Image (spheres, rainbow, N blue to C red):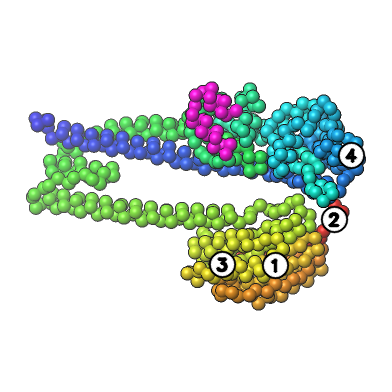
């Protein structure tokens, strides 16, 4: 090398450096692209699994409500044979997801002369057919759908089975025990069932198509395959028997997590194609089954492979072009300038760790070398500072988004909230002014007849307010119990918040308890905006205040409850001050007067449309003015109680 010319040395040195840099960049680009794709696959896979699980769970929950409601009816009164048959036939006929339904009475529970009685209606050939499961050949007392809920004394979903002599299909059954009190003792009078056909689940899961060979499958709580593209596995194999046959400990561990109700995103080898895949799995909350969805790695990484080929081709072309340029420079300028040119090439490719050669002359070449050194140091420092600042900003934004998702996740968000309840309609919305906010709302039943609801507004904004909001919501739900009046609930929650409140935060809160049978609302207002009653006749009236302080301000403050009655067709509208204090570009407030006008204008619409209408009017009023406070609204429309409807 000592005898080689300067041009050769420069060419060899620079091209070697460029090659190393290219390989590093290529490797980094490949790994970074792969990581992004895996992250996107995981996010999309989780969303897809969650959507499919929610789709199945919604149907299963609606199916569960049918026998649960019927158990309440049969627990109160004994229907005649014709009435019970008509009721079961009506249930099967008007619930498309239900394949069949039966009422299996305990021995002598229906008739002291009948050991077994179990009318069963099911769908077959487009018709509703009847079968008596009480026949001696069926022996329903020994069936899992009868024995398990009886022994556990609670509703259960059975493992999939072929119902020979009953529905004569592969099905799963939701069984609910019902009770009667005889001679002062309460006992199980029988089991009410709702059957679903596994073909319905197979259609939903089979609709999941990922690339060319991706698919979904469903396993039961014991690991049995409920659905799978490989039909011989269904009802014949479990995920553990497959793990044993393959000698795959990883598959066995995944199976354990799935049957224990866990969620995850893991590497997985397809049992259908043998390809390496990513698999997301998530549980069904109703039946405790688990859904798995496979994403083939080679098909999803095809774009990255094509991109890498393109990058290699472009790299080779760029390498050849760079060779010509370097040869020309090496042969056309002096050695010091050639060296500096090579350094400049390295810096231009992003290599800020390159060494500037020491040039002792004080002429223009020496000054140029000094300038290069200063430029490299300054640029490296600037990039370092910029990288650190960008990373901090992205981390803060990411954490705030996660906090927003968590906060929104703890609030009810499925409406209609109680589709099975005909006595009332309820709808609520919240729009935080920042990524996270301090407003809250909640509703839940204290017992079968009393609905507890609340709307609150924490002082301040941002993360502290959101944490205080989460604590308040949790305390209310923990403290509120059956037969406890609102004033006692607020007294206890206020005491909890006031005792340890170093940040001196407080929350205004309106809490009420609705008796869905007669429309009576007992309420207590802790410094919150008075709600409005929208009467059926169109009158808008504010709810009388109870003179309560905001919660967290003063220990041992004694709250007082009041009550009023919602008549059939009346509605209660509750809101936070973000509604009336919304400001436009002229710094005018939306005000209570405008709100009352909008409620009067929208009074005849469904509850969801009323809130949507008020929200749209606030946005129209605010125009381009940024939202200054959280906007929360809740409306309860009372439809009245009709005890004659089953």
Question: Quarter of the image containing the N terminus?
Answer: top left
Could you say whether the residue bearing mark 2 is in a helix, strand or loop?
Answer: loop
Cα distance in 3D space between marks 1 and 2: 25 Å
Cα distance in 3D space between marks 4 and 3: 55 Å
- The residue under label 3 is 496
Cα distance in 3D space between marks 2 and 4: 27 Å
Query: 332 or 466, which is in the foreground?
Result: 466
Main SS of the magenta part reads: helix
Which is in the foreground here, disc 2 or disc 3? 3
- The residue under label 1 is 485
**Residue 596 shown in magenta:** no
Query: 455 or 164, which is in the foreground?
Result: 164
Could you say whether the residue bearing mark 4 is in a helix, strand or loop?
Answer: loop
Mark 1 or mark 2, which has the lower sequence index?
1
- Asked if the residue at tag 3 contacts the one at tag 4, i.e. Cβ–Cβ closer than 8 Å, the answer is no
- Asked if the residue at tag 3 contacts the one at tag 1, i.e. Cβ–Cβ closer than 8 Å, the answer is no
- Asked if the residue at tag 1 contacts the one at tag 4, i.e. Cβ–Cβ closer than 8 Å, the answer is no
Residue 471 image point, x, y percent = 55, 62
Residue 20 image point, x, y percent = 27, 35
């Amino acid at each position: 090398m000592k005898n080689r010319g300067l041009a050769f040395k420069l060419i060899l040195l620079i091209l070697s450096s460029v090659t190393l840099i290219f390989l590093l960049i290529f490797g980094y680009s490949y790994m970074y692209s792969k990581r992004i794709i895996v992250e996107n696959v995981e996010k999309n896979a989780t969303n897809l699994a969650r959507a499919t699980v929610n789709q199945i769970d919604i149907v299963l929950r609606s199916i569960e409500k049918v026998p649960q409601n019927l158990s309440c009816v049969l627990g109160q009164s004994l229907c005649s044979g014709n009435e019970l048959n008509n009721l079961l036939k009506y249930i099967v006929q008007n619930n498309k997801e239900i394949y069949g339904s039966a009422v299996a009475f305990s021995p002598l529970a229906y008739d002291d002369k009948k050991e077994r009685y179990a009318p069963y209606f099911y769908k077959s050939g487009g018709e509703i057919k009847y079968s008596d499961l009480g026949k001696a050949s069926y022996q329903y007392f020994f069936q899992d759908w009868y024995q398990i809920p009886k022994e556990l004394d609670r509703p259960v979903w059975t493992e999939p089975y072929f119902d020979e002599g009953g529905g004569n299909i592969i099905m799963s059954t939701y069984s609910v025990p019902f009770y009667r009190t005889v001679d002062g003792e309460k006992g199980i009078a029988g089991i009410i069932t709702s059957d679903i056909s596994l073909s319905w689940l197979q259609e939903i899961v089979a609709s999941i198509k990922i690339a060319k060979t991706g698919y979904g499958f469903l396993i039961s709580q014991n690991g049995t395959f409920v659905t799978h593209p490989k039909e011989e596995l269904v009802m014949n194999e479990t995920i553990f028997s497959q793990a044993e046959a393959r000698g795959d400990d990883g598959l066995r561990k995944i199976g354990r997590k799935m049957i224990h109700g866990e969620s995850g995103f893991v590497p997985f080898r397809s049992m259908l194609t043998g390809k390496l895949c990513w698999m997301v799995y998530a549980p069904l909350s109703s039946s405790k089954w688990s859904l798995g969805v496979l994403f083939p790695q080679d098909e999803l990484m095809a774009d990255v492979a094509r991109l890498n080929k393109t990058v290699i081709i472009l790299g080779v072309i760029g390498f050849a072009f760079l060779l010509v340029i370097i040869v020309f420079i090496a042969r056309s300028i002096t050695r010091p300038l050639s060296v500096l040119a090579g350094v400049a090439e390295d810096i231009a490719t992003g290599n800020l760790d390159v060494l500037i050669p020491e040039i002792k002359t004080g002429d223009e070449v020496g000054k140029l070398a000094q300038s290069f050194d200063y430029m490299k140091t300054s640029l490296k420092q600037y990039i370092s500072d910029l990288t650190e600042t960008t990373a901090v900003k992205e981390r803060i934004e990411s954490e705030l988004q996660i906090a927003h998702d968590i906060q929104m996740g703890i609030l009810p968000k499925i409406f209609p909230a109680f589709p099975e309840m005909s006595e009332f309609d309820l709808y609520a919305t919240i729009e935080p002014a920042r990524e996270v906010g301090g407003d809250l709302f909640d509703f839940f039943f204290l017992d079968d007849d009393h609905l507890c609801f609340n709307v609150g507004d924490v002082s301040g904004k941002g993360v502290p307010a959101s944490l205080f909001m989460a604590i308040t919501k949790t305390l209310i739900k923990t403290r509120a119990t059956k037969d406890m009046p609102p004033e006692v609930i607020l007294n206890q929650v206020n005491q909890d918040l006031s005792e340890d409140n170093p940040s001196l935060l407080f929350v205004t809160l309106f809490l009420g308890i609705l008796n869905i049978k007669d429309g009576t609302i007992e309420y207590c207002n802790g410094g919150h905006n008075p709600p409005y009653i929208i009467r059926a006749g169109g009158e808008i009236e504010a709810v009388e205040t109870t003179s309560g302080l905001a919660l967290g301000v003063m220990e041992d403050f004694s709250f007082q409850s009041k009550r009023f009655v919602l008549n059939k067709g009346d509605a209660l509208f509750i809101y936070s001050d973000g509604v009336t204090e919304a400001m436009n570009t002229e710094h005018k407030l939306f005000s209570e007067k405008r709100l009352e006008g909008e409620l009067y204008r929208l009074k005849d619409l469904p509850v969801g449309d009323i809130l949507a209408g008020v929200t749209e009017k606030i946005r129209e009023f605010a125009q381009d003015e940024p939202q200054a406070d959280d906007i929360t609204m809740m409306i309860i429309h009372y439809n009245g109680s009709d005890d004659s409807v089953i």
